[in-house]
Image: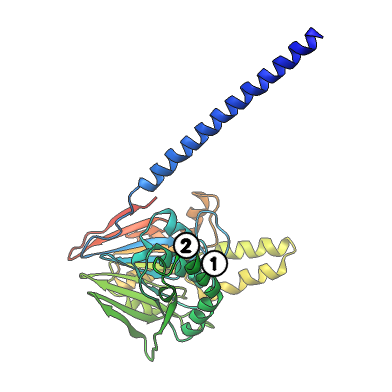
Amino acid sequence: MKRIALGALVLVATLFAGTCIATQFVSVDLWLYRLAAARMIARPQPQLAKSGELSVLLCGTGSPLPDPRRAGACTLIAAGDKLYVVDSGLGSTKNLLMWRVPLEKVAGVFLTHFHSDHIAELGELRLQTWVAGRKTPLKVYGPPGVEDVVAGFNRAYSHDADYRTAHHGETFIPREDVDLVAVPIPMSGATAPALNADGLKVTAIRVHHDPVRPAYGYRFDFARRSVTVSGDTASYEPFALAARGSDVLVHEAQSNVLVGILGDVLSAAGRPRQAKIMHDIPDYHTTPVDAARIANDAHATLLVLTHINPPLPFAPVAEHAFLAGVSNVRPDGWILGRDGTLIRLPGHSIAIEKTEVD
């Protein structure tokens, strides 16, 4: 009987001690979480461009094919303290949030065309800029047809906006500020004016992405510096002419050799639908070598390759294969873009500063 009582006492003591230790560990866990949260939130927002400075942030350098290291198509242009987003591919808004980009400063979105990989996160960008503190409806510029895209996203996210305003209050996130506003850019020739405000001039440029018509690239001029973004296009001489003299040319790049290999492998694996897609896409994209030729023809100072297709999982071997021949055409003045690449162009200067955000 005494042994049973002693055993029960030991069990109770053990359970009590375990509870105390567990409670202590929970307290430690909460303390560590609070510490980590405080450190994370205390990290400063990046200053993407100083006053009178133009900069480029690659917020998505991937293609429709899944790539764990690259979000979908997205390029952010900072002109002083105003931000403009070119395309909004899958995962790009998440990148901007992780990098603590001040999304309330996004003053406009430019869509190059309406393929899904270029508009997939327009709704999320709409939401996150509003929650961050955007005070006016967000203008979305693009080829004719942008009205349909914008109306669709506004309608799809209308209930979400109603819920959030009802929950947080009209004063905090006014319902009237959330919506996107379409700004179609008609074009009869090779270029058309898209925006001219606060010292920034944006020019839409026709590109060749048939059967996608029209499809645009964009040129940004600010403080005597310039950045041109191609969007999706086959090699196209009028685009090079419109991009002439750009400090930075952000141009799509697809290795047709690697895409062809991928198509052959898919076919051999009994996946004919995916194989057909691989064999269909080379005629409306630009190879890295042709992008280098376009940069030369445009007399661009720095070529930045983006919209990388196919994914390059075995770096640096796959990257070497992807970039084969580029250096023969353009020995220097080019880089392979990566998510987080930031390029600063100080105003009234020829300096180009390359760095990364994290």
Measuring from the top left, give residue 226's x and y in whole percent: 27, 70
Q: Is residue 252 left or right of residue 310?
A: left
Name the residue at the right extreme.
1
Name the residue rendered at 29%, 75% in the picture. 244
Q: Quadrant of the N terminus?
A: top right
The residue at which mark 2 appears reads as 92
Q: Helix or strand or loop: what does disc 1 sit on?
A: helix
Measuring from the top left, give residue 113's x and y in whole percent: 48, 78
Instruction: Tell me the tag on residue 319.
Output: none
In the rendered image, is residue 88 in sight?
no
Instruction: Tell me the tag on residue 256.
Output: 1
Q: Nearer the viewer, mark 1 or mark 2?
A: 2
Q: Is residue 181 left or right of residue 19?
A: left
Compare residues 286 and 108 and report the one nearer the observer.
108
In the rendered image, is residue 18 in sight?
yes
**Amino acid at the residue labelled 1:** Asn
